Image (spheres, rainbow, N blue to C red):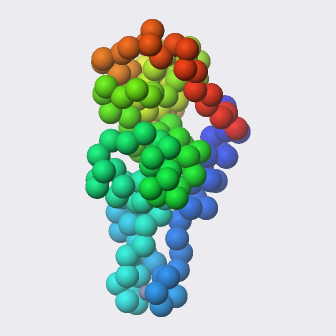
Amino acid sequence: MSNGRIEIEKLLRTNKPVFCEECGGKLSYRSAGTYVCEKCGHEELDDFGKIKLFLDENGPSPIHMIAKGTGVNRDIIELYLKKGRIEIPEGSKYYLKCEKCGCSIRYGRYCPDCARELSGGIASLLNEEVGEKPKSANDSKMQGKVHYLNKR
Ligand SMILES: [Zn+2]
Ligand SMILES: [Zn+2]
């Protein structure tokens, strides 16, 4: 598990913009994926900022639409889902699969049940990767549409 985790952290870090596109000035982090140029005030977004902006403007969207609209690789979008930075809304046709039991979760890597089982006494370690099951689960419908989660 630690390997995959390091890969994710690395991928997310390399997505941060460093210099302003307009003037080449240094960007400083503001909030939620937004960066501001210290020289000219120009705003830049990292991948998370782009995804957030797209979702703010378009509402809940399937991953392939987000990828198309933002130009962000869908692997990256899934990484943010696994990290719990974004989540799939209730009533979606598409959910993530718990990496242990395969049930539907809206974000994270494990459903709460598996997380409890996996973590034993160290629940806090897994906290950010624990997802939430959709309340309106239509699992039987989804059963045939296995979505492979790329475990690196
Ligand atoms: Zn600038
Ligand atoms: Zn599970």
- Across and down, in percent, residue 122 comes to 51, 25
Residue 127, position in %: x, y? 45, 31
66 w.r.t. 120: above or below: below
The residue depicted at 56 percent of the width and 61 percent of the height is: 15
| Percent x, y of residue 124 | 46, 30
Is residue 121 visible to the viewer in this orientation of the structure? no
Q: Is residue 84 above or below residue 33?
A: above
Left or right: 60, with 12 as reference point:
left
Q: Residue at x 44, y 49 (%)?
A: 66
Please give the count of numbered marks on the rendered protein: 0
Question: Front-most of 147 and 97?
Answer: 147
Residue at 44%, 13% (x, y): give it. 141
The quadrant in which the N terminus is found is: top right
**As drawn, 67 above or below 131:** below
Residue 118: x and y in percent read 56, 18
Residue 150 can be seen, yes or no: yes
